[in-house]
Image (cartoon, rainbow, N blue to C red):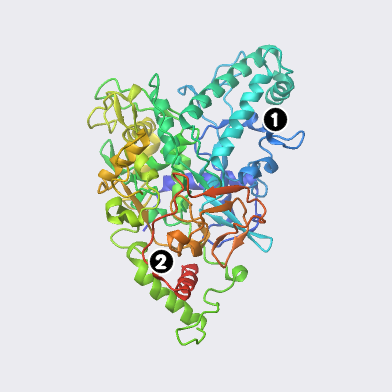
Amino acid sequence: MLRVGWAGRGALAALLGASFLVTGCKTSPSATARQGWEDQARAAWYNAGQGSRLLPLSWFRALEPPADSQAAAGSHFSDAAYLARFRVLPPWPGAKLPIGFGVSSIDDSRLVKTSLHWLSGKAPRDDRVDWVGLNCAACHTAQVSFAGKPITVDGAPGLFDFQSFVEGLDKALIETQASAASGADGQRWNRFAAAVLGPKDDTPENRKLLLAALGKLVDWEGQAEALNHTDLRYGFGRVDAVGHIFNRTLLFAGAPQPTPNTPDAPVSYPHLWNITKQTQLQWDGIAQNDKLNIGAIPTDYGAMGRNVGEVLGVFGEAVIKPPSGPADFSGFASSADITNLNALEVLLTRLQPPRWPSDAFGIPGHIDVADPSGRKLAPEEVMKAGEAVFNANCAACHTPHEHYETMKTFAEMGPQNQTDEWMACNTWAFTGASGALTGVPANYVGGDKLTATEPVRVLLTTTVKGALVGQKLAFAEAAAENIFGVTPLPQARPQGAFAVPQTAKDLRLRFCQQNAADPLLAYKARPLEGIWATAPYLHNGSVPTLYDLLQAPANRPVTFRMGARAYDPKKVGYDTSATAEGNSFVFNTAMPGNSNKGHVYGVGSMTEAQRLELLEYLKSL
């Protein structure tokens, strides 16, 4: 049973109350799946700040879209109409920011890269400003549409095109900076500076400071963009989150020339209901429960570590300062908002899987299927037959066993069932220069000291632990009150295919396949409650519908269109037709990182009737 202490309840109440007062919302913007959250909780989820520092809020509101975006004249980057191209959901009624964007304001005097100030005559503490950043809801809120009516599903994978969003934002910032250069027309810069500074503070001195601050942010994001460059397009609903977090970690470590680890293994955003039942998180299970001693308190930091890592990966900041000695527990300064992260984690414990909306899509089992004699099956017979197919082919992995989820290593899956190896392989094999982390104990408070080059997953773990120690008072309070509940927190090519490796990437995959039994070279299968709301399917989003997933790999779509919210209840997934509004991205499964092979487990031998029966049963979970 979850036990939330008084401090945890206070944090959650403050988060909910603040969000409700800001939004004032009482009604939902669309039909909403019944998942155990009231509107007040939903509003908090949509716009709570986590410590992500995308850019100052006033900049976000003043920034114009890139010149080649074909945006309407006079529009701003933050306009809902412009952000819709990235499939950002519009603000919840009464809110001022789109779903998935939150505001935070902290004393940034200990930060380095995102400590920006542009008002002359004021100390940094006196001109502290609100920053806007992304939160969980940006990627983990879905909206599907059927017969012109939208249905919002909280905690489901959204269609957010993170890659294009970041590229567009960086381009808009660069163009604004360039507009202020000598010989430029200056119009874009003048509009931006006037909006940010306002009549009272719009002075030549402040404009000079503002331009310097803009240049600082552009340079910082340029460093990240250089490390994160990949020719692979993620498209809607995917991101290589681990790759981006790894590269940010290398930047925080501050090595003079960090080695890029190309984030070319995008994955679908996982759904979040029942996440507190899991013991291993991320698709490859790399985020596992662990212990960190704060004084005499052994604390499961798994959920908090995952959340802090997520914040650092999406525009947060950590400042690596090696401890001066064994007794130095000052930790790393960071922008992570521990209080809100705690409250959001508690909120997720109340999120229920969405039930199939029978009133919109029809009651499961009501399809035209016959038994071998030709007799049409009644709906209850269809469901019973589908359950039998599930138990025979799926239940070994997709029902709770020793743990809620089932981990399968590359070796256990075998080549025939491996889908796309790159996410797990990159996570396991990427290495980088330790920079300022060199010599820091691996657990910050203990463990072997890091050498000059380490696996980036090790560097990330040390960075996260240092950031948690840096906020030890807030973290210790959460630990003492057991805010997350009981401990532990429930939270491929065939081997030898590259006989003569040609590239570093080829070598990396061979290295991974040679270590196929390593528990970190694995993918996760978990129970399928609410699976209807989690399209597209497989960990990398390479199969558009459940019906397609139940086909043999050779019969799955090689290419399909993405971007539309229109839902296909017959196939269970988004409408991939060229005529569906918004289907502007073509997903090509032939690209490395996009493979749709594997996950066979009997699907190729099913009859069409069995396939349809199983599909109806899956709708009911």
Which residue does the numbered mark 2 point to in the structure image?
603
Identified at 72% across, 18% down, the residue is 186
Camera-side mark, 1 or 2: 2
Which residue is painted at 41% across and 71% down in the image?
A: 606
Sequence-first tag of 1 and 2: 1
How many residues crowd around disc 1 within 10 Å: few (fewer than 14), some, or many (20 or more)?
Answer: few
Three-letter code, disc 2 = Val
Residue 67 is labelled as 1
**Furthest residue toward front:** 500
Q: Quadrant location of the N terminus? A: bottom left
Residue 353 seen from this side: no
**Is residue 447 rendered to the left or right of residue 321?**
left
Q: Secondary structure at mark 2?
A: helix
Would you say 326 lies left or right of 525 here?
Answer: left
Task: Tell me, for residue 262, which label it has, or none.
Answer: none
Cα distance in 3D space between marks 1 and 2: 49 Å
Q: Is residue 270 visible?
A: yes
| Local crowd size for mark 2, using a 10 Å CA cut-off: few (<14), some (14–19), many (≥20) | some
For mark 1, give the secondary structure.
Answer: helix
Q: How many marks?
A: 2
Q: x, y (%) of residue 257?
A: 40, 21
Decide which of 110, 99 is in the foreground and name it: 99
Q: Residue 392 location in percent, x, y?
A: 35, 71
Q: Identify the amino acid type marked 1.
A: Ala
Instruction: Indicate the position of residue 452 as horizontal and vertical percent values.
Output: 29, 23
Which residue is outermost to the right?
A: 73
Report the front residue among 582 and 269: 582
The spot of residue 424 in percent (x, y) is 36, 45
